[in-house]
Image: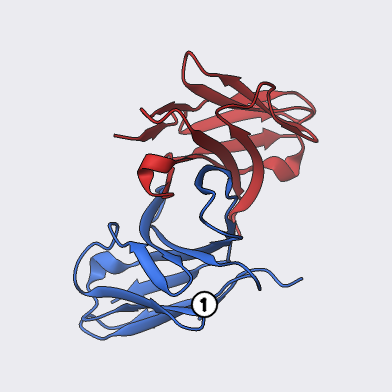
């Protein structure tokens, strides 16, 4: 079946503009995760969704970042008033349930490469 | 606090030889899971192998095995018979109940396989 898809694959924007990044998880996966990966760095957790609710938003770096998920499927990560330090690859992952916690393997999308000029 | 440490920024291995990528972790939660992911230059994260904290045996998946030493809190990845296509970044990760099912990742190790 289809894996996790993300769009756009690349996004170049000007400082101060808003951007929306989209994630389409694997069909039937109820848990969805957003991560940020800066150049040459590991993954930084941003937010976790269980269904449409977000029990863990602890990783969002500032109030310029928000995310929503509708219909238990597609999720959108929005960055308002983008800054140059927001430039990174934004990765989305999904897992089957999320509630089993430690046993949940996450499957990742290809990422969106964001460049803020 | 939970933490994953990968101390090898880069590793070289000769094709067809085995290589071990180090990972140590820290958590106070008795129940946790450990994962290894591969990230080739294309950028996609590929799941390789999983080890649960209560698993009695080390996990194996084809050429990948996880050397799990619970007392030392280490979860090293062993790749046998290295292939050129194994050249990539490798990330160790952990999730635990007290982390709210958040998965934390190490900084990664870049593996170079030489012909």
Q: Does residue B55 lie above or below A73 as drawn?
A: above
Which residue is at a point 50% across and 65% down the rendered structure image?
A: A32
Q: Position of residue B91 (x, y in %)?
A: 52, 41
Which residue is at a point 59% across and 33% down the rendered structure image?
A: B52
User: Is A111 on the left-hand or right-hand side of B104?
Assistant: right
Colouring style: by chain
Q: Position of residue A20 (x, y in %)?
A: 38, 83
Q: Which chain is red?
A: B
Q: Position of residue A46 (x, y in %)?
A: 35, 60
Please tell me which residue lies in front, B113 or A51. Answer: A51
Whether residue B40 is visible here, answered yes or no, is no
Chain of the residue where label 1 is placed in the rendered structure: A
Which residue is at a point 49% across and 40% down the rendered structure image?
A: B93
Q: Quadrant of the N terminus of chain B?
A: top left
Q: Which shade of the palette goes to chain A?
A: blue
Crowding at mark 1 (Cα within 10 Å: few <14, some 14-19, many 20+)? some
Please tell me which residue lies in front, A4 or B79. Answer: A4
């Amino acid at each position: 079946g289809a894996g996790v898809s993300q769009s756009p694959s690349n996004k170049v924007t000007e400082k101060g503009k808003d951007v929306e990044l989209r994630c389409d998880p694997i069909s039937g996966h109820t848990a969805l995760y957003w991560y940020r990966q800066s150049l040459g760095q590991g993954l930084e957790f941003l937010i976790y969704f269980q269904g449409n609710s977000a029990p863990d938003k602890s990783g969002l770096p500032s109030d310029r970042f928000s995310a929503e998920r509708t219909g238990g499927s597609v999720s959108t990560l929005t960055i308002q008033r983008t800054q140059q330090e927001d430039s990174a690859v934004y990765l989305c992952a999904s897992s089957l349930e999320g509630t089993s916690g430690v046993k949940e393997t996450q499957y990742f999308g290809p990422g969106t490469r964001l460049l803020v000029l | 606090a939970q933490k994953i440490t990968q101390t090898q920024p880069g590793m070289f291995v000769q094709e067809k030889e085995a290589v071990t990528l180090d990972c140590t972790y820290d958590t106070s939660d008795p129940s946790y899971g450990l994962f290894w992911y591969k990230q080739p230059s294309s950028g996609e994260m590929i799941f390789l192998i999983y080890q649960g904290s209560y698993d009695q045996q080390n996990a194996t998946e084809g050429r990948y095995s996880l050397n799990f030493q619970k007392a030392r809190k280490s979860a090293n990845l062993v790749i046998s018979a290295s292939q050129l296509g194994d050249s990539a970044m490798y990330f160790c990760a952990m999730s635990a109940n007290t982390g709210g099912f958040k998965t934390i990742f190490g900084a990664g190790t870049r593996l170079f396989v030489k012909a």
